[in-house]
């Protein structure tokens, strides 16, 4: 399964983007500025000690470990991870828990496949 994350707006404290899964379902994203360099990364579902559940993990990011995709609405809800939501308002995202449920179901449906995320800077 391939996920494309297209970043379209960067400010001093956040990066907004759209993440599409195999071009079938898209989510809004929010990340802190300058955390994950643009590029292609392998992913896996693994146990998150912080969240006490299975979450998508982005692997082999230079100088970083434990980068997850999880729910949240504002930059202060992440310490370097990718937040997902169904909607975007100005500079934050909403309906994050519902979007995360949808994303985890997609990963479950593709559990026997390898997972890749392509992060593309547009700004």
Image (spheres, rainbow, N blue to C red):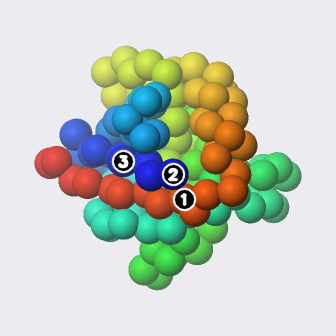
- Foreground disc of the pair 3, 2: 2
Q: Is residue 105 visible?
A: yes
Task: Name the secondary structure under disc 3.
Answer: strand
- When asked about the image quadrant of residue 70, the answer is top right
Cα gap from disc 1 to disc 2, whole angstroms: 5 Å
Secondary-structure class at tag 2 = loop
Q: Which residue carries the number 3 mark?
A: 4
The dot on residue 53 is: none
**Which residue: 45% across, 40% down?**
21
First in residue order: circle 1 vs circle 3: 3
Q: 64 or 99, which lies in front?
A: 99
**Which residue does the image show at 22% across and 53% down from the upper left?**
121
Residue drawn where x is 50% and y is 68% of the image: 42
Residue 53, compared with residue 84, is above or below; it is below
Front one among 9 and 115 = 115
Q: Circle 1 — which element?
A: strand
Give the camera-side residue of 54 and 72.
54
- Decide: is 98 above or below 37: above
- Which of the numbered marks, if any, corresponds to residue 115? 1
Q: In the current view of this chain or complex, which residue is farthest to the right?
A: 52
Residue at the disc numbered 2? 1
Distance of mark 1 from mark 3, alpha carbons?
A: 11 Å
Q: Is residue 79 visible?
A: no
């Amino acid at each position: 399964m391939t996920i494309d994350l297209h970043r379209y707006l960067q400010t001093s404290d956040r990066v907004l983007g759209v993440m599409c899964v195999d071009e079938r379902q898209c989510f809004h994203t929010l990340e802190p500025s300058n955390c994950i360099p643009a590029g292609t990364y392998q992913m896996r579902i693994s146990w998150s000690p912080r969240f006490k559940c299975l979450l998508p993990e982005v692997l082999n990011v230079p100088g970083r470990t434990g980068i997850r995709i999880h729910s949240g609405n504002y930059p202060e809800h992440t310490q370097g991870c990718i937040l997902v939501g169904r909607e975007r308002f100005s500079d934050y995202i909403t309906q994050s828990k519902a979007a995360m449920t949808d994303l985890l179901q997609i990963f479950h449906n593709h559990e026997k496949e390898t997972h890749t995320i392509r992060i593309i800077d547009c700004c």
